[in-house]
């Protein structure tokens, strides 16, 4: 499990961007705000596309 805060720091995301990523991919963190490693990689891929196309 990976902390959402670690994912945010690793991908240089604002809280708003992290929120968009989590809600758009329907990721549900557990009670400790942790997600799976697979979901962390999905967010990293999302960030790459988000920044490339500059929505």
Image (tube, grey):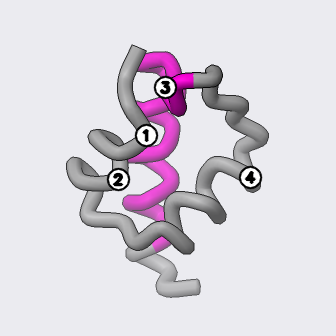
Which secondary structure lies at badge 2? helix
**How dense is the environment of label 2, judged by Cα within 10 Å: few (below 14), some, or many (20 and up)?**
some
Circle 2 is placed at which residue position? 8
Residue 44 image position (x, y, % from top left): 39, 46
> Which is more N-terminal, label 4 or label 3?
4
Circle 1 is placed at which residue position? 4
What is the distance, in whole Å, between disc 3 and disc 2 at their CAs?
Answer: 12 Å
Q: Is residue 23 above or below residue 39?
A: below
Residue at x-position 51% and y-position 53%:
46
What is the distance, in whole Å, between disc 4 and disc 2 at their CAs?
Answer: 14 Å
Which secondary structure lies at badge 1? helix
What is the distance, in whole Å, between disc 3 and disc 4 at their CAs?
Answer: 15 Å
Which secondary structure lies at badge 4? helix
Q: Is residue 12 above or below residue 39?
A: below
The N terminus, quarter of image: top left
What is the distance, in whole Å, between disc 3 and disc 1 at their CAs?
Answer: 6 Å
Badge 3 vs badge 1, beta-carbon distance below 8 Å: yes
Residue 43 image position (x, y, % from top left): 48, 44
Task: Give the extent of the magenta segment.
Answer: 32-50
Q: Which mark is residue 23?
A: 4
Circle 3 is placed at which residue position? 34
Is 10 displayed left or right of 29 in the figure?
A: left
Badge 3 vs badge 4, beta-carbon distance below 8 Å: no
């Amino acid at each position: 499990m990976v902390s959402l805060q670690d994912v945010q720091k690793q991908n240089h995301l604002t809280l708003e961007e992290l929120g968009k990523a989590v809600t758009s991919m329907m990721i549900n963190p557990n009670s400790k705000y942790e997600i799976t490693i697979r979901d962390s990689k999905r967010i990293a891929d999302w960030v790459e596309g988000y920044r490339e196309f500059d929505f």
